[in-house]
Image (cartoon, helix red, strand yellow):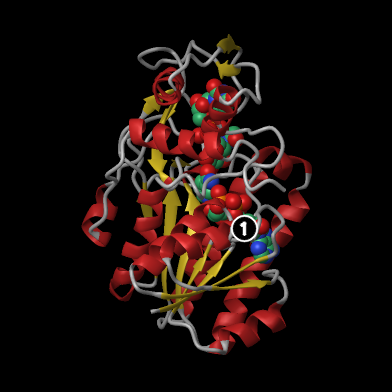
Amino acid sequence: MKVLVTGASGYIGSHTCLELLKAGHDVVGFDNFSNSSPKSIERVRELAGKDMRLETLDLRETEKLTALLKEGFDAVVHFAALKAVGESVEKPKLYMENNVGGTASLLGAMEIAGCSRLVFSSSCTVYGAVEKSPVGERHPRAAVNPYGQTKLDIEDMCYELASEDKSWKIALLRYFNPVGAHESGRIGEDPKGIPNNLMPYVMQTAVGRREFVNVWGDDYPTPDGTGVRDYIHVVDLALGHVAALSKLEEFQGAQAVNLGAGRGYSVLEVIAAAAKAAGKPIPHKIMPRRAGDAAAIWADASLAKKKLGWETKRGLDEMCADHWRWQKDNPEGYGE
Ligand code: NAD
Ligand code: UD1
C-alpha cells in the first residue's frame, strides 16, 4: 500500500514507519517537528535499507495537505498530535486547535483527495477514571484532562463521519502505555524537558541525568501498593498498525481497538526490570500520590487478537533492555 504517515518523525511514528517499510509498503511521512527531529527518519532509512520521503508540513495547512494527498494514497496513519497532559491543562485551546482542528483539516483533505482509509492514534485515556481492569472497548468513555478530551472529540468526529459516509473505514487504536525502543538502539523516545512518564524518567535516572525516581504513591490497592499499568513495547505497537492496515477493509465504519499487552506491571516492577537491564541499582523514593492517577489499568486485548490477528510478543525485560540500549547509546536523545 502507499501510506501517508502524519507525525512520522515522532516516537511511535518513527518505529511504525520502519515496520511499514519492512512490510513492503511505500511510505511518505510528514511532521512539523514541534516535538521531534528529522534525524529519526534518517535512521529509519538506514535501518530499513530503503528510502522514504519526509515532508515538513503542519496538519492545519489544509491546502498543502490536500495537494500531497492528491498524489494518491491508499491509507493515512495519523500520529500527529500534542500529547503532554500537564501542558494541555495550561493550554487547552492549543490542544483543541492542534489535535482536533488538525484532524478536521486532515479529514477534509482526505475527503477532497478521495482517500477514506484511516488508522488513528487514540489512547486508553478515553476510558477516564477506570475502577476495574481489564478494560474493554465498550467501557464508558470520559475525559479527565484537555488532552484526553481531544482524543474523545476526534473519535467522535470519526464515528460521525463514518456513519454519514459509508465509504470510510477507520481504526481507532487505543494505546495503553508505549515504552521501549527499536532493538538496534538507533531510534527511541526523545522527550523534551523533564519526562512526565515513568519509563523515560527511570532511564534518565539510570543514565545519570536525574538523581532519583519519584514513586508516586505506594498505598494503592495493588499487590505492592504502587500504580499498575499495561506497558507495551513500541515495536509491538508499531506492528499493531501494520496489522490494522492489513485488516482495514474488514472494518465497519469507525471501530475502536485496544492495543495493549493485556497485563499490568507495577512501578516497582518496572524499576526493578530497568535496574536489571542497566546492570545497576536505580535510586527511587516513595512520594505522595500524583493527582488524577488511577491505581491500576490494563487492557482487555482480546479484540485486537480476534480482529487484527495481533498480540504483543515482547515482555517487560525486553522493553527495558531495548529502552536502556537507546538511552545509553543516545544519552541526549537525537541531540537537538
Ligand atoms: P510524539 O510527540 O513523539 O509524536 C507526535 C508527532 O507529531 C511529533 O513528531 C510532532 O512534532 C508531530 N506534530 C504535532 N502536531 C503536529 C501538527 N500540527 N502537524 C504536524 N505534525 C505535528 O508522540 P508519540 O508518543 O509518538 O505519539 C504519537 C500519537 O500517539 C499521538 O497522537 C499521541 O497522542 C498518541 N498516543 C501516545 C501515547 C504515548 O504514551 N506515547 C499513548 C497514547 C496515545
Ligand atoms: C500518562 C497520561 C495519560 C497518557 C499516558 C500515555 C497522566 C495523568 N496521564 O498515563 O494521559 O495516555 O501517560 O503513556 O499524565 N509514575 C511514578 N513516577 C514517575 C512517573 C510515573 O511513580 O515519575 C507512576 C504513575 O503514578 C503511574 C505509572 O508510573 O502509576 C505510569 O505513569 P505514566 O508513565 O505517567 O503513565 P500514565 O499515568 O498511565
Position in image of residue 207 (x %, y %): 58, 26
Amino acid type, residue under disc 1 in the picture: Lys
Secondary element at tag 1: helix
169 or 240: nearer the eye?
240
Relative placement, left or right, of 130 versus 151 is left
160 or 182: nearer the eye?
182
Q: Answer above or below: position of 75 versus 225.
A: below
Q: Residue at x 50, y 88 (%)?
A: 72
Quadrant of the frame with the N terminus: bottom left
171 or 58: nearer the eye?
58
Is residue 278 in view?
Answer: yes
Q: Residue at x 70, y 82 (%)?
A: 64
Q: Answer above or below: position of 41 versus 105.
A: above
Position in image of residue 287 (x %, y %): 60, 12
Q: Answer above or below: position of 113 versus 180.
A: below
Relative placement, left or right, of 41 versus 278 is right
Instruction: Using a 10 Å C-alpha cutoff, classify the residue at mark 1 as few (fewer than 14 neighbours), some (14 to 19) or many (20 or more).
Output: some
Q: Residue at x 65, y 17 (%)?
A: 211
Where residue 32 sits, quadrant-wise, is: bottom right
Position in image of residue 247 (x %, y %): 29, 69
- Whether ligand 1 has any atom under 8 Å from the Cβ at mark 1 is answered as no
Q: Residue at x 55, y 23 (%)?
A: 206
Residue position marked by numbered label 1 in the rendering: 39
